[in-house]
Amino acid sequence: MYKVINKEIETQFPSLDMAMAYAKTLDAFVSITGSEFEIVGMFGVDSVKNGLCPDGIAYDWNKASRIGATKRHR
């Protein structure tokens, strides 16, 4: 069994797939707990289109600009 916890509300599901599908519909920060692990976060943000995240915020993260950044800022 997997529990999806949203604020104080717990909902149980027989499979992880069903729990994650439900978590995506909530559009909120949730916790999914199983017998051996716990997953936390907002589920469903899985694409960037035209430079925007699904919630409309600009996606500007660039790996190339992060490489060696800690060495440059010392």
Image: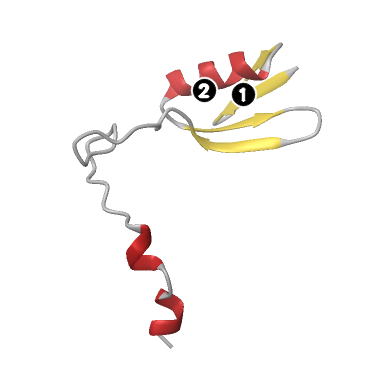
Under mark 2, the amino acid is Ala
**Who's the residue at 39% across and 84% down the image?**
73
State which quarter of the image contains the N terminus: top right
State which quarter of the image contains the C terminus: bottom left
Farthest-out residue, bottom:
74
Q: Is residue 23 above or below residue 36?
A: above
User: How many numbered marks does the figure carry?
Assistant: 2
Label pair 2/1, CB-CB below 8 angstroms: yes
Q: Position of residue 16 (x, y in %)?
A: 66, 20
Q: Residues within 10 Å of mark 2 (few under 14, many from 20)?
A: many
**Who's the residue at 28% across and 37% down the image?**
53
Under mark 1, the amino acid is Val
**Who's the residue at 22% across and 36% down the image?**
56
**Who's the residue at 61% across and 24% down the image?**
4
Position of 7 with respect to 1 (left or right) is left
Position of 56 with respect to 5 (left or right) is left
Q: Alpha carbon of mark 2 to alpha carbon of mark 1: how far?
A: 7 Å
Residue 33 occupies quadrant: top right
Q: Which residue is mark 1?
A: 4
Farthest-out residue, right:
35
Label 1 secondary element: strand
Q: Which mark is residue 23?
A: 2
Depth check: give the residue in front, 23 or 47: 47
Depth check: give the residue in front, 12 or 55: 55
